[in-house]
């Protein structure tokens, strides 16, 4: 890999490296995002944050909220998959936002609003129109390892539900499957719950829907979409989907 860009800001080290045709964002050595504008499905965790949008009926995902952006790879992919009318991304780190706009191609993407703010406070104070899809990818680095910025407990779940449409979809990134299982068994109005994992990652992405969903719809939709948008070739995305209920 080649380092294309590097800055140290207030003791935090940021790097953008090239890996073939892909760009990778590292903060203090932690791998945050991989993005390839010609191949949006990278085979990484960021893919698992976006593809659950395909579980819900076409055109039903109109408004999307993404909490924690990294380099914005999930936003690019959500736009390509379901093209929502409005997508709000909330990111605490202004340097990440600068990198996202200048290097990862976010500046000028239509229908996307980036808010530089504490996502936890943003959710708790939000009183606007509710969202059809919320993606929670709130992490920070501790000793070179990613950790969730807020525990996925009953109080946080209640705050997220207050921002979600009655038939909405919540996607949450967890450090591992153990953390996901604790959240999956909290009392909530879910009709379908799935776990998404990848062989090379310990992360478990939880998918919580207020509709009955067919998990096979993700692969069927990807196959259909890739015929008209070559950026959505999914042959490198070898995920496992497990239905909890």
Image (cartoon, rainbow, N blue to C red):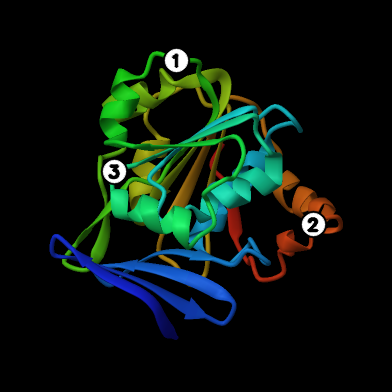
Which residue sits at x=25%, y=40%?
150
Which residue sits at x=28%, y=49%?
93
Q: Nearer the viewer, residue 148 or 27?
A: 27
Q: Which mark is residue 229?
A: 2
Q: Residues within 10 Å of mark 1 (few under 14, many from 20)?
A: few
Assess whether mark 3 and mark 2 are in contact (beta carbons under 8 angstroms): no
Mark 2 and mark 3: span between their CA atoms? 32 Å
Q: Looking at the image, is mark 1 or mark 3 earlier in the sequence?
A: 3
Q: Which residue is mark 3?
A: 92
Mark 1 and mark 3: span between their CA atoms? 20 Å
Residue 118, quarter of the rendered image: top left
Q: Residues within 10 Å of mark 3 (few under 14, many from 20)?
A: some
Q: Which mark is residue 128?
A: 1
Q: Which mark is residue 64?
A: none
Q: Quadrant of the C terminus?
A: top right
Which residue sits at x=47%, y=50%?
205
Question: Residue 20 appears at what percent x and percent y?
Answer: 57, 82
């Amino acid at each position: 890999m080649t380092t294309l860009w590097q800055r140290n800001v207030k003791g935090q080290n940021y790097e953008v490296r090239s890996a073939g045709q892909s760009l990778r964002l590292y903060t203090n050595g932690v791998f945050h995002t991989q993005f390839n504008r010609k191949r949006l499905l990278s085979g990484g965790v960021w893919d698992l944050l976006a593809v659950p949008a395909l579980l819900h009926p076409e055109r039903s995902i109109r408004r999307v909220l993404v909490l924690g952006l990294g380099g914005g790879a999930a936003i690019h992919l959500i736009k390509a998959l379901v093209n929502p009318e409005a997508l709000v991304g909330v990111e605490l780190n202004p340097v990440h936002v600068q990198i996202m706009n200048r290097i990862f191609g976010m500046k000028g993407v239509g229908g996307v609003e980036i808010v530089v703010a504490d996502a936890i406070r943003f959710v708790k104070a939000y009183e606007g129109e509710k969202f059809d899809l919320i993606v929670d990818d709130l992490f920070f680095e501790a000793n070179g390892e990613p950790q969730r910025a807020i525990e996925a407990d009953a109080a946080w779940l209640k705050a997220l539900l207050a921002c979600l449409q009655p038939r909405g979809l919540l996607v949450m990134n967890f450090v591992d499957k153990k953390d996901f299982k604790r959240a999956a068994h909290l009392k909530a109005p879910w009709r379908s719950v799935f776990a998404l994992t990848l062989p090379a990652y310990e992360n478990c992405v939880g998918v919580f829907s207020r509709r009955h969903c067919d998990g096979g719809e993700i692969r069927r939709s990807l196959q259909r979409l890739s015929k008209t948008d070559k950026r959505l070739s999914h042959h490198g995305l070898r995920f496992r989907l497990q239905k909890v209920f």
